[in-house]
Structure formats: structure tokens, C-alpha cells
Amino acid sequence: MTSEQRDQLTFDDPTTRHPDITPPEQDQPKPGLDAELEPRSDRGETSYRGTGRLEGRKALVTGGDSGIGGAVAIAFAREGADVAINYLPDEEEDAARIAELVEAAGRRCVRIPADVRDREACDLVVAEAVEGLGGLDVLVVNAGRQVAQESIEDITDEQFDDTVRTNIYAMFWTCRAAVKHLPAGSSIILSSSIQAYSPSETLLDYAMTKAAMNNFGKGLAKQLAPKGVRVNIVAPGPIWTPLQVVDGQPKEDLPEFGKGQPLGRAGQPVELAPAYVFLASSESSYVVGETLNVNGGADSP
Ligand code: NAD
Ligand code: MG
């Protein structure tokens, strides 16, 4: 089978479906670009095949320029959704590439550069998405910040504040602004992490925000279920994205990234996309407040 014929439904061995990568030690300035990741990641550019599961839907994906969010934006578009992506102004190069792929699928892409560490920015991101898409029925809260530190004493107040603002405050502000726009049938999906239950000693501030996301998602799910809006969570394991090379891991750990999972390799962003498609689509109508772990086989509650 040629690479052109492979898609997410191809029957094959998950241990070898994607290469067992050994990334060289590398460092990018924050927020980091997929365009400069070594080796490049797979966001489904050549492989994700849509089957009409999100026909006519209107989705906002924060952090939709790269990594997992980029793969989700591509998949959503190929499933028939128009997509708004939010990202930082420094990520315009990655965002332009995702927009190109969304538009190549025949869908609209609304680009919204904005720093979500600020409430007004979150309000604006939602307002611009609603205006640009003509409504909203999928919200993926995926923007995230992760900076590894060997010691608690190395975590500055500034880092702690940035992590909590990006991962928790922005989630709250974005969801709060979006709720009034979401008709029955809509989905909210939060990008949490395996770190929520299995915190690394180097990710104290990050891991606790992901635990908070799991908790918030389950509570909000109960609140919105009677209105017909479903909230669910995706908890990825080690996925090869720019987040890892902007101090997301200690640099010397990068060559071993993901090798300790039962599948023996790191995940690629494209392997996350089907989980988000499933949770966004009406086929998951009875799935509410669930955390879907996509982690290569690690323990989860
Ligand atoms: P990524 O760097 O490609 O995506 C993160 C995105 O967050 C960036 O592209 C950026 O646009 C956005 N962002 C960060 N700070 C922002 C800010 N202040 N304002 C606006 N946008 C901001 O990396 P990724 O790994 O795809 O991360 C996506 C999500 O997945 C994150 O929430 C991350 O915590 C989560 N996650 C990743 C992994 C992994 O191994 N890569 C594992 C578990 C969870
Ligand atoms: Mg990015």
C-alpha cells in the first residue's frame, strides 16, 4: 500500500504505524513552530480521510495552529466543519499552513491570533469565531503551556502564573463566553493530559492544571447536559509536538520521548484527531463527562 492510500482506518500494527522517533536535543523559543520541529510531526496532512461526520458544523479550536490542535483542525475540516483557530501572533506561519489545509478541504478557516492569558482576549476569540463562522457548535479548549523545571524552587511566580492563566483561566473564560452561543447538540472538548493522574516531578505546575481541567470538565458536563450540550475531555500521552521543545521536557530527555509507553513510541498528533472527531460528532450522543485517554497504553483511572 502506498502512503497516498493509507488513512486513519488502514488496518496495521500500531507499534509500527508511525516511526519510533528519537528526536535530537533541540530548543525553540516559545511558543515554538511545527515548521521547525525535528523530526517533523504527522498531523494527518496526507492521511486523514473525512467521512462526513461533522457536515456543516462550526468549530473553534484554541491552539489550532500546530500539534494536536492542528491535527484536529485538519480532521474537522475534512469531516465537513468550518473551523476557527486561535493561536499566538508569533505562530502565524503554522496557522497559515493549517488554514491552507482547511481551505483545501473546501471549508472556511477563520484565523484569530490572540493571547488567551487575558479575559478580554478570550471573550474576543469567541466573538470573532461566532461572527466568522456564523455560529458555534464545537469548542475545543486546547491551548496549553508546559515548562519543565527540575526543582520547585526553579518555578518562578511568573511561570506559575503563566501556566495557570493559559491552562485554567483561559479554559474557564473561553467556556464561559461560548456557552450562550452553543445550541443543543453542541460539544465542548478539553485537552487535558495523562499528567492529570500521573504527574512528572518536573511538571508540578502544569500537571495540576490538567487535573483541574478533568475536574472542571466533569462538573460542567453535568451542568450543560440538560441543555443538550456535551462536555468531554481528551487526555493525551506523550505526543510529538512543538510543546515538547520549548522547555516542555528537559532537553536531554527528548531522544527518549515516548519510548516508555507500552506501544514503545511517542504518539503523533494525527492519532489524536479521531478522538476529538468522535466526541464532537453526534455519534457520541450518550458520552458525557468522559475522559478519553489516548496515551499508547499507560495506566489511567
Ligand atoms: P502545541 O505547542 O502545538 O500547541 C499548544 C498551543 O497552545 C500553541 O500552538 C499555542 O497556539 C497555544 N498557546 C499557548 N499559549 C497560548 C496563549 N497564551 N494564548 C493563545 N494560545 C496559546 O502543543 P500540543 O502538544 O499540541 O498541545 C496542545 C494541548 O495538548 C495542550 O493543552 C497540551 O497541554 C496538551 N497535551 C499535549 C501533550 C503532548 O505530549 N504533546 C500531552 C498531553 C496534553
Ligand atoms: Mg503552535
Image (spheres, rainbow, N blue to C red):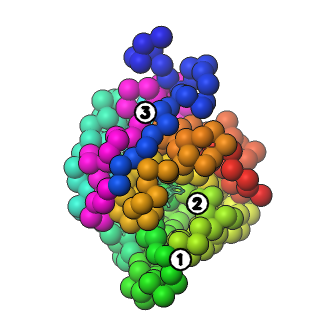
How many C-alpha atoms fall within 10 Å of the one at disc 3: few (<14), some, or many (≥20)? many
The three-letter code of the residue at mark 2 reads: Ser
Q: What residue type is labelled 3?
A: Gly
- Contact between marks 3 and 2 (CB within 8 A): the answer is no
Residue carrying label 2: 192
According to the image, label 1 marks what residue? 205
Answer yes or no: disc 2 within 8 Å of ligand 1. yes
Image: magenta residue range: 26-54
Between residues 75 and 30, which one lies in front from this camera angle? 30
- The secondary structure making up most of the magenta span is loop
Does label 2 or label 1 sit earlier along the sequence? 2
Which of marks 3 and 1 precedes in the sequence? 3
For label 1, count other residues whose C-alpha is less than 10 Å away and answer few (under 14), some (14-19) or many (20+).
many
Indicate yes or no whether the magenta region holds residue 33.
Answer: yes
Residue 235 appears in the rendering: yes
Question: Who's the residue at 34% across and 29% down the image?
Answer: 106
Q: Residues within 10 Å of mark 2 (few under 14, many from 20)?
A: many
Camera-near label (1 vs 3) is: 1
Q: What residue is rendered at 61% in x and 25% in y?
A: 13
- Whether ligand 1 has any atom under 8 Å from the Cβ at mark 1 is answered as no
Q: In this view, does 57 lie above or below 246?
A: above
In magenta stretch: residue 248: no
Image location (x, y in percent) of residue 76: 46, 38
**What is the C-alpha distance between the residues marked 3 and 2?**
21 Å
Q: Quick one: SS at disc 2?
A: loop
Q: Which amino acid does label 1 sit on?
A: Asp
Q: How far apart are marks 1 and 3 (CA)?
A: 31 Å
Q: Residue at x 43, y 70 (%)?
A: 147
Lower position in the chain sequence, tag 3 or tag 2: 3
Rendered location of residue 58, percent (x, y): 45, 45
